[in-house]
Image (cartoon, grey):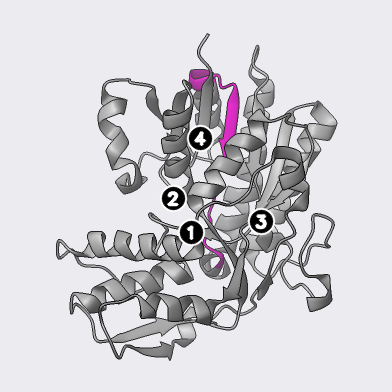
Amino acid sequence: MKKRALITGISGMVGSHLADFLLGNTGWDIYGMCRWRSPLDNVQHLLDRANRKDRVYFVYGDLCDYISLQNVVEESRPDYVFHLAAQSYPTISFSSPIHTLDTNILGTERLLEALRRCHDIDPIIHVCSSSEIFGRVAKEKLPINENCSFHPASPYAISKTGTDLSGRFHAEAYGQKVIVTRMFTHTGPRRGDVFAESTFAKQIAMIEYKMIPPIVKTGNLDSLRTWADVRDAVRAYFMLVTINPIAGEYYNIGGTYTCTVREMLNYLLSISTAKNIKVETEKSRLRPLDADLQVPDTKKFKAHTGWKPEIPFEKTMKDLLDYWRDRVKPGRHFLTR
């Protein structure tokens, strides 16, 4: 019988790329959970297949509504679950902490309970935590391994700490096949414009088309990050659930290229067709507290699966900039957030 995968948050950057990967590399049917009001821009290329019921099915659910999750699980009856849906914007979590905690902690708990209580299924469940759980890490603890203490630096990071612990609890207490990942910074085409590298690329594209003055507005440029490509990330997630998956395990996943946000911005500026672009810090873009040293130790995951990143930083950034060039080219209006 054909395998089924449920992707929560299929309309996001990672969810949409994961759907692409699974459609191209497996024979599985893909059930993508999204809210009825979710923008479908990232999955526009899948809508015709969904209309024809060609291995792609959209199911409506909300992490804040348990009944909807029961319905999603009953309809999809998955063999694999990739739980990617979340309130995923750290900066927004400072102004919407309760929504963030409800969606990410209680939403994960609701989903795991719906899966646990559905009869005659026993899926392998990937719960997507975040490197943000490590938060404020001392330099001597770099690179960050799985046993580094948690020091979350935002309501988002706190919510992902709860997500992480909830997933591991369900594996230990109820025997569910839950595996948790802490993915470090990953980006590429379809990245939301509230994230640093994507808002920079979007602003640069808008400057190239003379839609805004030649000034890129920024937040903290001194944060140190290790960058991975989203297409490498989804390949890692596939390997996570198909190569000797071990219930209750947890892994750091991330790239190999490390630089500051400032250096990342300088690279984007260097490949822009616009010259003499100025950079200005905007107070509203600064977090009250920042996780400023995000460098992973990924030996555990690599040893278990054999995964390694393949897409270089330069290609990731060029593809991100080209994505925004294509988005703004038709003359659509965008906020410069």
Question: Tag 1: Cα neighbours inside 10 Å, few (<14), some, or many (≥20)?
Answer: many
Whole-number angstrom distance, CA of label 4 to CA of label 3:
20 Å
Nearer the N terminus, badge 2 or badge 4?
4
Estimate the x, y position of residue 197 in percent, counting from the top left.
45, 70
Q: Is residue 295 visible?
A: yes
Please name the amino acid that badge 2 sits on.
Met
Q: Which mark is residue 64?
A: none
Please name the amino acid that badge 3 sits on.
Ser
Nearer the N terminus, badge 3 or badge 2?
2
Camera-side mark, 4 or 3: 4
Q: Residue 13 carries which label?
A: 2
Question: Tag 4: Cα neighbours inside 10 Å, few (<14), some, or many (≥20)?
Answer: many
Magenta stretch: includes residue 297: no
Residue 260, picture quadrant: bottom right
Whole-number angstrom distance, CA of label 1 to CA of label 2:
8 Å
Please name the amino acid that badge 1 sits on.
Thr
Whole-number angstrom distance, CA of label 2 to CA of label 4:
12 Å
Residue at the image position 57 percent from the left and 70 percent from the top: 94
Whole-number angstrom distance, CA of label 3 to CA of label 2:
20 Å
> Which element is circle 4 on?
strand
Magenta stretch: includes residue 78: yes
Q: Which mark is residue 159?
A: 3
Looking at the image, residue 13 lies above or below residue 156: above
State which region is magenta. Answer: 74-90
> Which element is circle 2 on?
helix
Q: Is residue 60 visible?
A: no
Which residue does the numbered mark 4 point to in the structure image?
7
Which residue does the numbered mark 1 point to in the structure image?
187
Residue at the image position 27 percent from the left and 21 percent from the top: 52
Residue at the image position 58 percent from the left and 52 percent from the top: 309
Camera-side mark, 3 or 2: 2
